[in-house]
Image (cartoon, helix red, strand yellow):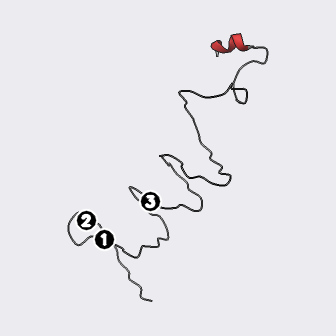
Amino acid sequence: MSSLRVTSLRGRTAGSSPTLPDGVVITGVATATSFSGNVTGNVTGNVTGNATGLTGTPNLNVGVVTATSFEGNGSGLTGLNIPTSSDWRDSSLF
């Protein structure tokens, strides 16, 4: 196997990217404007888009979630700062 040490890879013509028909293995940090394929391991940083095709028992942890609507009666909601002496009539106050 040969080794190639380079500082920069550029496409053959200005503004084009190099073609790697057999793929590439990156050790370290890779920055991409888009990605297509499977992701394995731990993902850190900011991720946007839709999580689709999740299988098994996925554990998604998110920060702030803003919803325009929800389904159900809300009985399973936790972390709400509502006094225990309140009833359903008081809910519009919070």
Q: Identify which residue is drawn at 43% across, 58% down.
A: 35
Q: Is residue 27 left or right of residue 92?
A: left
Nearer mark to the viewer, of 2 and 3: 3
Q: Quadrant of the C terminus?
A: top right
- For disc 2, the marked residue is 16
- Separation (CA) of disc 2 from disc 3: 19 Å
On the picture, is 64 further left or further right than 20? right
Q: Nearer the viewer, residue 36 or 27?
A: 36
Q: Nearer the viewer, residue 58 or 66?
A: 58
Q: Amino acid at mark 3?
A: Ser
- Give the SS element for disc 3: loop
Residue drawn 62% across and 45% down? Answer: 61
Please indicate whether residue 22 sits to the left or right of residue 8 in the image: right
Single out the mark in the foreground, 3 or 1: 3
Q: Tell me how far mark 1 sits from mark 2, CA to CA.
A: 7 Å
Q: Dot 1 surroundings within 10 Å: few (below 14), some, or many (20 or more)?
A: few
Q: How many marks?
A: 3
Residue to which mark 1 is pinned: 18
Q: Could you tell me which residue is drawn at 47 percent across and 70 percent down?
A: 26
Q: Amino acid at mark 1?
A: Pro
Q: Residue furthest bottom?
A: 1
Q: Which residue is mark 3?
A: 36
Q: Callout 2: helix, strand or loop?
A: loop
Residue 91 placement (x, y as % from top left)? 67, 15
